Image: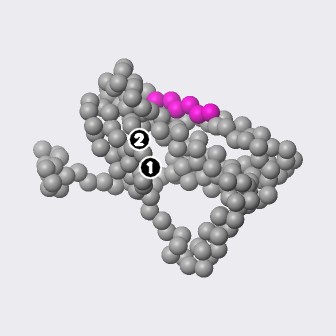
Amino acid sequence: MSQESVKAALMKSIAGIQASDGAAKVVFRAETQLEEDVRCSAKVRNFPTIIVDEPPELGGADAGANPVELLLVALGACQEIMYSAYASVMGVPLNGVKVNLRGYLDLRGLFGLDPAVPAGYQKIIFETALDSPADAETLKKLVQTVESHCPVLDTLVRSIEVSGQVSVNGKPMSIEAVAA
């Protein structure tokens, strides 16, 4: 798909949203299932199954990326997609985008060895490399636009509501049962 095709698709979506507020509200879905040991499968839409696993030192067989690595992948890919999308809409020539990411995790939190240490990442660093003949001011505007509109980056830096429920043998687990 060319930059013009991307722009045409995005402009059509924007026009649809402007015509109907309801078109702006979307729900993305994924389904995961534990397969064996710590290996899981994940399904998204009609795509092939994604295998998620841990490295051997965390009990896995290294059959796929682990969840915290997939979080980094989601951030990097979202950044790249947003650069492509906004560059096409803003008319910024873009030859390439590459994102290198590092996530810093303290395993004491994961294993519950220190209650003061969070189970998740303590810091994520990403380095984005753009290849473009555009001038510095144009690229600065592009970067500011992407950084302020990337959904995955926004989700990671903003406190959001996350809720869930657990059922056991097809029946919802009550709070009392969890506390007991």
With respect to residue 93, does 19 lie above or below? Answer: below
Foreground residue among 136 and 118 = 136
Mark 1 and mark 2 residues within 8 Å of each other at the beta carbon? yes
What's under tag 1, amino acid-wise?
Phe
In the rendered image, is residue 149 in sight? yes
Foreground residue among 12 and 107 = 12
Which residue is most to the bottom? 19
Question: For residue 160, which numbered disc appears in the image?
Answer: none
> What residue is shown with label 2?
50
Q: How far from the left and from the top, in percent, is residue 131?
A: 77, 40
Q: Residue at x 33, y 38 (%)?
A: 40
Foreground residue among 106 and 80 = 80
> What residue is shown with label 1?
47
Foreground residue among 147 and 10 = 10
Disc 2 packing (10 Å; few <14; some 14–19; many ≥20):
some
Q: Residue at x 26, y 33 (%)?
A: 36
Q: Which residues are magenta?
A: 100-105
Disc 1 packing (10 Å; few <14; some 14–19; many ≥20):
few
